Image: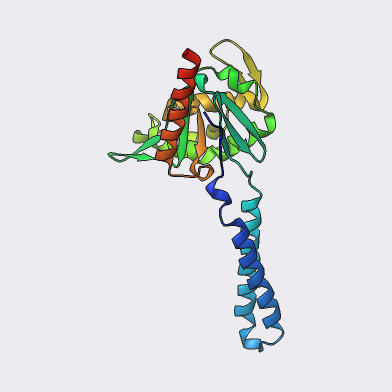
């Protein structure tokens, strides 16, 4: 299988936004020298819009050029604070996580990965990336707790949604018995909570993809199946 490097949607139009913002900014600076006082506020507003457009473009281009790499034997996730790696044989299930909204099941803007062996993942991840993942997942954790928490329909989960309810224990023991401490342990506990609530241990945001989530799930499962067949043969 050919290695596929995924250029994320979050990087798209970054350079265009920078150029557009620079044109607006330079034009407004030039115009400010010739405007009457009554037109000063609109010109300044447009100048701020131009600067903000440049900033958004810079932030887009600050993301990794590749967000994911699909290799013959593994899946790699690239983040500006590090990255993680999962062997295809260690992935049990790939799909979009869903939550209940009333009587409906609504897909979340993530790809969910359910893994078999926590140790193969946790022993390779860096504390710096673990901190970022814990921070970035707080919003979806809060949403899942509100929707899927067993006490929520009766109104009993409100206290757990604030403060300590979003924090994880700094000690973790994996199913194999290996012990972890610090932010790696917190990430392990977060993975357990996400599995309980959503059925998946890891979440990849959809802005890291290069196509709709449903199509990307199909692509990942195709790589996983082909990798497993190669290993069997």
In this rendering, would 218 be left or right of 141?
left
Point out residue 220 in the picture as x, y percentages from the top left corner: 46, 31
The quadrant where residue 150 appears:
top left
Depth check: 50 or 224 in front?
224
In this rendering, would 38 be left or right of 207?
right
Quick check: can you spot residue 159? no
Quick check: can you spot residue 175? yes
- Above or below — where is 31 with respect to 98? below
Depth check: 87 or 21 in front?
87
The quadrant where residue 2 appears:
top right
Q: Residue at x 30, y 41 (%)?
A: 102
Point out residue 5 in the picture as x, y percentages from the top left corner: 57, 38
Point out residue 177 in the picture as x, y percentages from the top left corner: 58, 10
Point out residue 92 in the picture as x, y percentages from the top left corner: 45, 21
Residue placed farthest to the top in the image? 177
Residue placed farthest to the bottom in the image? 36
In this rendering, would 180 be left or right of 217?
right
Residue placed farthest to the left in the image? 103
In this rendering, would 175 be left or right of 32?
left
Depth check: 45 or 17 in front?
17
- Above or below — where is 54 with respect to 106? below
Q: Residue at x 41, y 39 (%)?
A: 215
Give the colour scheme of this rendering.
rainbow
Depth check: 67 or 174 in front?
67
Count of numbered tags: 0
Q: Residue at x 56, y 10 (%)?
A: 176
Q: Residue at x 64, y 20 (%)?
A: 123
């Amino acid at each position: 299988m050919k290695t596929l490097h995924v250029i994320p949607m979050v990087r798209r139009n970054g350079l265009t936004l920078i150029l557009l913002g620079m044109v607006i900014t330079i034009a407004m600076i030039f115009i400010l020298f010739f405007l009457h006082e009554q037109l000063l506020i609109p010109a300044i507003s447009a100048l701020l819009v131009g600067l903000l457009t440049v900033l958004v473009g810079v932030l887009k281009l600050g993301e990794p050029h590749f967000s994911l790499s699909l290799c013959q034997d593994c899946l790699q996730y690239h983040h500006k604070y590090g990255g993680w790696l999962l062997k295809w044989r260690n992935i049990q299930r790939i799909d979009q996580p869903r939550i209940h909204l009333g009587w409906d099941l609504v897909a979340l803007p993530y790809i969910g990965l359910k893994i078999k062996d926590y140790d193969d993942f946790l022993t390779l991840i860096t504390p710096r990336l673990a901190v970022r993942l814990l921070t970035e997942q707080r919003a979806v954790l809060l949403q899942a707790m509100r929707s899927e928490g067993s006490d929520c329909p009766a109104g009993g989960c409100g206290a757990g949604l604030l403060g300590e309810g979003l924090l994880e224990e700094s000690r973790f023991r994996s199913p194999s018995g290996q012990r972890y401490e610090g932010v790696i342990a917190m990430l392990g506990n977060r993975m357990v909570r996400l599995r309980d609530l959503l059925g998946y241990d890891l979440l990849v945001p959809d802005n890291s993809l290069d196509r709709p989530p449903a199509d990307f799930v199909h692509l990942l499962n195709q790589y996983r199946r082909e990798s497993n067949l190669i290993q069997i043969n």
